[in-house]
């Protein structure tokens, strides 16, 4: 059979173009599924079925099939009877949320919130009782009456400084009535027994104390105003040759040093720099009773020589007792003439620039100040700018 008639027929009556199908999704809104034969037959025989939208008459493509709207099954024809799908049971919490959101949407459309109706923020439930909240914020607790911090009590007993006590507590080296205490801020009763481990004693024994003869121009603590700190003089080269302490110098000994009793830049003499908190507390603590001795060169009015002759005895008595600094009366002091131009002071307290301020109150001008003794430790023949160790057998 010849292909010519079929070719002519095709040219006269062209076939409609093949429609490109979209990939069929397994499910979801808008998915197009194939109709079953039973449903097609029911649609053709239904008497009251609404007519579908007529397809456009085109030779290029057949009528376009309308996608099923959201919420309608794709295999149901418009107008056909369908049973309502039962809604899933809603939990009470979900219903409350939905109703609340619906109310919020309704109130936000076309209605303005009154200016006076400010939103009320719900109080956060912490789950703590008022008593526990007071305890958290440091309120006084009945059980704490008469109790003191463990570190403070250790310092009061002279065991160590508070800083050392905190370090030992964290390391588990402190026992109260035989039980290890490792929590900072712990409180105890004053009558409870405190013991420390041998490791704490060994560490404390390794801490050193330096006795330095500070020159003028050095500050006792940290550098200030381009003046170097006195600790810069603690080198192996500046160690006094007559120092008989059997301690080997190491740069590690310079860590944690603190001055115990400062001297100002214009003063010279004995300066104690120590790693041992017990010694620092003994010398400069609030309850310290260690006396310090000074030699003070003075001038009175225009007299720089033979000042003793021109200075009134009543003012000398006032230096001994009767002065106040910052509206606080000073403790009695020992003040005597060492020579016609020099006074000897012995103080049992150490306020900032105390001797200089005392002299100013009675008309004296300090031209030189040197500390020569602290407690039982004397400066002696230690040269200026050099240092020695405080021996274990020496006590202030």
Image (cartoon, rainbow, N blue to C red):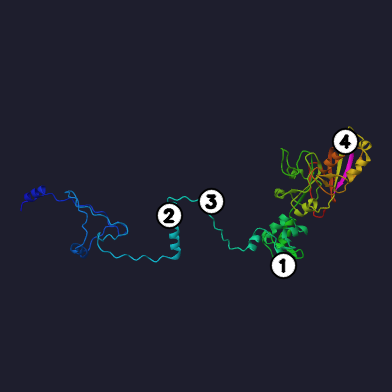
Answer with the quarter of the image where residue 41 lies. Answer: bottom left
Q: From mark 1 to mark 4, how far is it between C-alphas?
A: 61 Å
Can residue 345 be seen in this snapshot?
yes
| Residue 95 placement, left or right of 234 | left
- The label nearer to you, 1 versus 4, is 4
- Residue of label 1: 178
Q: From mark 2 to mark 3, how far is it between C-alphas?
A: 20 Å
- The label nearer to you, 1 versus 3, is 3
Q: Earlier in the sequence, mark 2 or mark 1?
A: 2
Residue 254 at x, y = what percent?
A: 72, 48
Whether pointer 1 and pointer 4 mark residues with C-beta atoms closer than 8 Å, the reply is no
Nearer the observer, 283 or 134? 134
Above/below status of 41 relative to 4: below
- Residue of label 3: 116
Q: Earlier in the sequence, mark 4 or mark 3?
A: 3
Q: From mark 2 to mark 1, how far is it between C-alphas?
A: 70 Å
Whether pointer 2 and pointer 1 mark residues with C-beta atoms closer than 8 Å, the reply is no
Magenta residues, dominant SS class: strand
Residues drawn in magenta: 342-347
| Residue 272 placement, left or right of 21 | right
The residue positioned 91% from the left and 36% from the top of the image is 307
């Amino acid at each position: 059979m010849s292909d010519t008639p079929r070719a002519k027929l095709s040219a006269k009556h062209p076939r409609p173009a093949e429609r490109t199908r979209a990939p069929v999704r397994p499910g979801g809104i808008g998915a197009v599924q194939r109709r079953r034969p039973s449903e097609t037959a029911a649609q053709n025989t239904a008497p009251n079925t609404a007519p579908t939208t007529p397809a456009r008459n085109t030779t290029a493509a057949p009528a376009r099939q309308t996608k099923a709207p959201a919420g309608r099954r794709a295999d149901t024809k418009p107008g056909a009877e369908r049973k309502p799908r039962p809604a899933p049971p809603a939990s009470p919490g979900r219903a409350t949320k939905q109703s609340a959101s619906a109310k919020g949407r309704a109130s936000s459309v076309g209605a303005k919130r009154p200016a006076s109706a400010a939103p009320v923020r719900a109080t956060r439930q912490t789950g703590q009782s008022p008593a526990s909240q007071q305890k958290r914020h440091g309120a006084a607790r009945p059980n704490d009456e008469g109790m003191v911090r463990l570190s403070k009590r250790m310092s009061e007993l002279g065991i160590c400084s508070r800083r050392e006590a905190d370090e030992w507590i964290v390391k588990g080296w402190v026992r109260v009535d035989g039980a290890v205490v490792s929590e900072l801020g712990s409180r105890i009763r004053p009558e409870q027994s405190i013991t420390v481990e041998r490791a704490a004693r060994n560490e404390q024994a390794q801490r050193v104390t330096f006795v330095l003869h500070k020159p003028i121009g050095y500050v006792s603590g940290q550098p200030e105003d381009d003046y170097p700190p006195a600790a810069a003089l603690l080198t192996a080269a500046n160690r006094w040759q007559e120092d008989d302490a059997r301690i080997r110098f190491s740069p590690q000994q310079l860590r944690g040093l603190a001055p115990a009793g400062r001297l100002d830049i214009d003063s010279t003499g004995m300066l104690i720099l120590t790693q041992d908190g017990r010694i620092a507390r003994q010398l400069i603590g609030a309850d310290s009773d260690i006396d310090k001795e000074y030699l003070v060169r003075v001038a009175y009015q225009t007299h720089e020589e033979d000042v003793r002759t021109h200075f009134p005895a009543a003012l000398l008595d006032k230096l001994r007792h009767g002065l106040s600094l910052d509206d606080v009366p000073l403790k009695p002091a020992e003040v005597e003439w060492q020579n016609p131009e020099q006074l000897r002071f012995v103080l049992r307290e150490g306020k900032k620039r105390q001797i200089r301020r005392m002299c100013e109150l009675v008309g004296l001008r300090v031209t030189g100040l040197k500390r020569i003794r602290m407690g039982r430790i004397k400066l002696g023949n230690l040269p200026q700018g050099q240092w020695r160790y405080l021996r274990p057998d020496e006590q202030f």
